[in-house]
Amino acid sequence: MTTLTMKPNYNKSKRGAKQNVKPSLVHWRFVVVLVVVVMVFVVLAVRAAYIQVIAPDNLIEQGDSRTLRTRNMPSYRGLITDRNGVELAVSVPVRAIYADPKIIHQKDGLSLTRRWQALAEVLGQDADKLRSMVTNPKRRFVYLQRQVSPAMAEYVEQLDIPGIYLRNESRRYYPTGEVAAQVIGITDVDDNGIEGMERLYNDWLTGTPGSRVIRRDAKGRQVEILETKDGEAAGNLQLTIDQRIQALAYREIKEAMLYYKATSASALVVDVKSGDILAMVNAPSFNPNDRDDVSPHRMRNRVFTDAFEPGSSLKPLAVLAALEFGNVKVGDVIDTSPGRMRLGGSLVKDERNYGPLTLEEIIQHSSNMGTSKLALGVPKNFLLDTYYNMGLMTDTGSNIPGESSGIFHERSRWSDFELATLSFGYGISVTTAQLARMYATIANGGVRRPLKIVQQPQSSGWQPQQEQVVSAKNANAVMTMMESVTQEDGTAKKAQVPGYRVAGKTGTSRKAIAGGYGEEYVNIFAGIAPISDPRLVTVVLINEPGGDLYHAGDTAAPTFSKIMGGALQLLNIAPDDRQVTSTLWMKGAQNGS
């Protein structure tokens, strides 16, 4: 029987020891990895919490700067129209051409020489100068040209020059051109008013553009509209101007300036009953749609800015002051013999010795002696107050930009000669608008109203301020006296308007220079029609006529007749001169037969 002897197995025990060590090492490695992973996630969580909860604004701002865009919706300037809705100023869509120099350099856009030459030709610029505007790659925005036409913009777009872009804008267009240029005014390249009504009512005419906030993706496509904000629409402006009368008056004024070789000419037509300015024209004028050769003197609204000595056109005021004070009556006679008199060493005289003259004849013959005696017959303060009350030393209330209040040197002591010269329109300077307001006050029965250029809506309930400054009786009497000026023996027969009774007064004054008066004249005619029911006042001024005709009765008076006659017909105002109307009817009947 064989006995098996068992030997200890040392190798087995060694392997068991190794196996006991290995699980422990794996365990620690797992713990380390797990801790690292957990720490990574903790750090990420803390970072995410910091970014999203504690300080999210910075990254949100960076993200929004890359994806959010605000697009402005176009807002056009308001319309300017005349009293009948005829458009005087409108806004038309145009484009602006601009460049991004950084993009041009990144895409080597300057190497496209032929395209840049074509761009320069269509813009009317030098190609080298155009390229020099985009040489700085650090700049991101440069205007190449503003307010280009849609056709030109389309051509530029087809050139496809990298970094050259277009943007929408608007430009002001004036359908009437030079006819109403000084009245309407103009805007600058940014569509802001800088002259005339455009400047005065710039805030009203300018709207607030709407906006829309959108989000774009990486390819620049719109993916979301986040916010829409409505803008405020621009207001429209309706003027009291009647474009028909405006065009008529401008045609006659421009023709008169050229025919009489005058430096300039102006005219103003006013509605007596409302104070509305129906026409306001100046020559020379300018084309507001093409300002390349516009000089400042053409842009000036001379009706309101230029003051002049009105001369004899102020003589009815001396008669009115005497009637108001009460030291004379309508039928009284003033002795103007011997046709001249000395006042403090200075001479006042008429063209000839008219002898005794009625108040009407003083106006009819434009007697310096007659008005001087009337002015010296009333207290100085009363005479000056009458001038003030008629609105000669103040603005007209129209709020026209650049309006002058005239020139009048108030003094504590007045000599008799100074008061005498004041009575026939020297020693005081007024504007065409102030003179028109004075005549409108007379035509309105002594009621003074401000002149008005903007039409007020009827629903507003707005009423013009008015004041009775002289009696209706005396104002009507003086107006009737002025009718004799346009009659056969008057100084302004050429101011007659067929079919209508016209009252008015000429004024031919020398222009003041240093040390006295020069050889240049200002010719004025201010008139009212029709006398039976006054509706219109028109003042015409011819400045420095250069031909053989230099009296107002030969220059301003016939121009007045054409403007007043045309305006009365355009407004369908019935004739009131029965004798003339009857004669015209008879001639028409004979021609018809």
Image (cartoon, grey):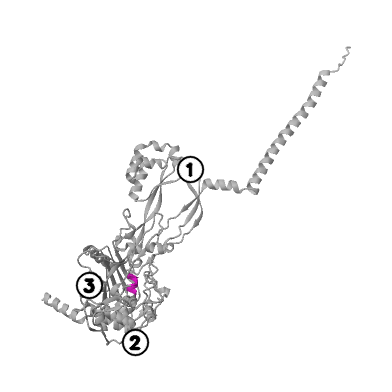
Task: Name the residue beneath numbered marker 1.
Answer: 219
Q: Position of residue 499 (x, y in %)?
A: 21, 77
Q: Position of residue 328 (x, y in %)?
A: 31, 86
Q: Residue at x 28, y 70 (%)?
A: 509
Residue 579 is left or right of residue 526, and the answer is left
Image position of 405 with respect to 108: above or below: below
Residue 534 makes an appearance in the image: no
Q: Tell us which disc is closer to us: 1 or 2.
A: 2
Q: Tell us which disc is closer to us: 2 or 3.
A: 2
Task: Identify the image quadrant of residue 575.
Answer: bottom left
Amino acid marked by disc 3: Gly
Task: Name the residue beneath numbered marker 2.
Answer: 326
Q: CA distance from mark 1 to mark 2?
A: 90 Å
Give the camera-side residue of 348 and 98: 348
Secondary structure under the numbered disc 3 in the rendered image: loop
Most extreme residue toward the front is 345
Q: Position of residue 49 (x, y in %)?
A: 66, 46
Secondary structure under the numbered disc 1 in the rendered image: loop
Neighbour tally class for label 2: few under 14, some 14-19, many 20 plus, Cα within 10 Å = few
Task: Name the residue beneath numbered marker 3.
Answer: 553
Secondary structure under the numbered disc 2 in the rendered image: loop
Q: Position of residue 183 (x, y in %)?
A: 34, 64
Amino acid marked by disc 1: Lys
Give the camera-side residue of 124 and 515: 515
Task: Identify the image quadrant of residue 38.
Answer: top right
Most extreme residue toward the top is 1
Give the camera-side residue of 315 and 375: 375
Q: Which residues are magenta?
A: 427-437
Task: Identify the image quadrant of residue 319.
Answer: bottom left
* Residue 434 magenta: yes
Q: Residue at x 36, y 82 (%)?
A: 470
Neighbour tally class for label 1: few under 14, some 14-19, many 20 plus, Cα within 10 Å = few
